[in-house]
Amino acid sequence: MEPTDLDPDPIAQLQRWLDEARAAGTELADAFALATADGRGTPSVRMVLLRGLGADGLRFFTNLGSRKAVDLAANPRAAAAFHLAAQSRQVRASGRVEPLGRDEAAAYFATRPRGHRLSAWASDQGQPVDSRAELESRVAALEARYPADEIPLPPKWGGFRVVPDRWEFWVSRADRLHDRVEYLREPDGSWTRRRLQP
């Protein structure tokens, strides 16, 4: 893999690799590891689902009281890593993070399955709970409160966009002499590609 083999736009290149992974039957090709750090620099990483990919970055949604959201409020930078194991590929990205508007969050929330929307209301993500029965009781109460399919966006739920200024596309090669191509954003918004040593 040469730097010139890849699309000049890293978003387009990521989209191509995700499409190829989906076409090959890769489950959860849109899942990526999201790393954040709190105000003291303590890191945390978890898997999230990519819920939008565009020229302005990578979108994901979460409970606004979750550790990731609290971290991003204190330190609005993150790193993402996609692992497309069946294709022997990885993609890494890092940059600033911006909150999405409530309208965009509401539009996405309305597309989620009913059970997912009820769970978003029921859960205070990452907080202690006495039992699973308590969570299930909350969901049952919400099912009664919202018997129709229209369930509003919870105040505690929203989205974020990672706006990368650095990308890396990685392909496994024999003898661990892997191919690595890094994209760096230039001041004018264009991208420079260069090969990295494995």
Image (cartoon, rainbow, N blue to C red):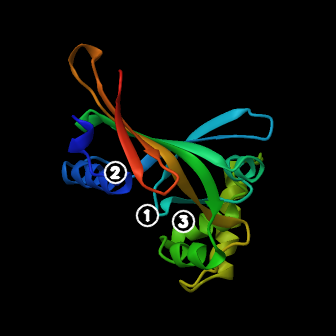
Whether label 2 touches label 1, CB < 8 Å: no
- Where the N terminus falls, by quadrant? top left
Identify the element where label 2 is drawn. helix
Q: Earlier in the sequence, mark 2 or mark 1?
A: 2
At label 3, the amino acid type is His
The mark total stands at 3
Nearer the camera: disc 2 or disc 3 = 2
Identify the element where label 3 is drawn. helix
Label 1 CA crowd tier, 10 Å (few <14, some 14–19, many 20+): few
Residue identifier under label 1: 55
Residue identifier under label 3: 116
The foreground one among 153 and 177 is: 177
At label 2, the amino acid type is Leu
Whether label 3 touches label 1, CB < 8 Å: no
Q: Quadrant of residue 84?
A: top left
Identify the element where label 1 is drawn. loop
Report how far apart the C-alphas of labels 3 and 1 lie in the structure.
28 Å
Residue identifier under label 2: 14
Report how far apart the C-alphas of labels 2 and 3 lie in the structure.
27 Å
